Image (cartoon, helix red, strand yellow):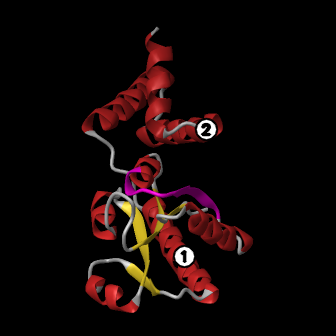
Amino acid sequence: MTNIIVVLPKLEDAKSIKNILVRNGFRVTGICTTGAQAISQADGLHDGIIICSYKLMDMVYSELHEYLPAGFEMLLMASQHLINECYGNDIVCLSMPLKVNDLISTVGMMTEEIERRRRRNRLKPKVRSAEEEASIQEAKELLMARNHMTEEEAHRYLQKSSMDSGTNLVETAQMVLSMMKA
């Protein structure tokens, strides 16, 4: 699920927004009254949505946006004349007074986009360092020499062992190396 942090100057307002979101199936990770609290909470998370007002107790929305970790999106709730200032800077805006349906559909849309981004990142091939490639190659060579396997057989053996043990290929290669060299 997508992490949502609600940051509003009045704690009661933040709790109200949280309750609306939770009743509609969203998980709210935290509620804050300052930008510093929000940044602190966001730093421990991979990605998510920050829902905030134009002005917080310690900063304005643009400063908060600047300090957020890379995977976070911002949903700004402000009056229409303030929203006109923030167009074109990668921030989703909702005008006040807030309509519950607009909030729910906007957060839903933002959540779907974050989930799509996560899926794309999972599907990207992992880039291994030269050191990791070297340990995989060394483990294959050791298996080929000791067990008279072809390179393809050694690679398949490492892959199967990796899946069976629930570790990645590099960790499996390192385990093979430590067991066979001992």
Looking at the image, is 108 positioned above or below residue 79?
above
Q: Is residue 141 magenta?
A: no
Looking at the image, is 105 positioned above or below residue 9?
below
Given contact means CB atoms under 8 Å apart, are the residues at marks 1 and 2 in contact? no
Q: How many marks?
A: 2
> Is 95 displayed left or right of 102 in the figure?
left
State the image coordinates of residue 45 (x, y, percent, origin top left). Answer: 47, 50
**Mark 1 vs 2, N-terminal side:** 1
Crowding at label 1, few (<14), some or many (≥20) Cα neighbours within 10 Å?
some
Q: In the rendered structure, which segment of residues is drawn in magenta?
A: 27-36
The tag on residue 65 is none
In the depicted view, which residue is nearer to us: 84 or 47?
84
Residue of label 2: 166
Q: CA distance from mark 1 to mark 2?
A: 29 Å
State the image coordinates of residue 136 (x, y, percent, origin top left). Answer: 38, 34
What residue is at 58 percent from the left and 69 percent from the top?
Answer: 13
Crowding at label 2, few (<14), some or many (≥20) Cα neighbours within 10 Å?
few
The kind of residue on which mark 1 rests is: Glu
State the image coordinates of residue 84 (x, y, percent, origin top left). Answer: 30, 90
What residue is at 31 percent from the left and 61 percent from the top?
Answer: 59
State the image coordinates of residue 168 (x, y, percent, origin top left). Answer: 50, 39
| Secondary-structure class at tag 2 | loop
In the depicted view, which residue is nearer to us: 117 or 138?
117
The kind of residue on which mark 2 rests is: Gly
The quadrant of the rendering that contains the N terminus is bottom right
| Secondary-structure class at tag 1 | helix
Residue of label 1: 112
Mark 1 or 2, closer to the camera: 1
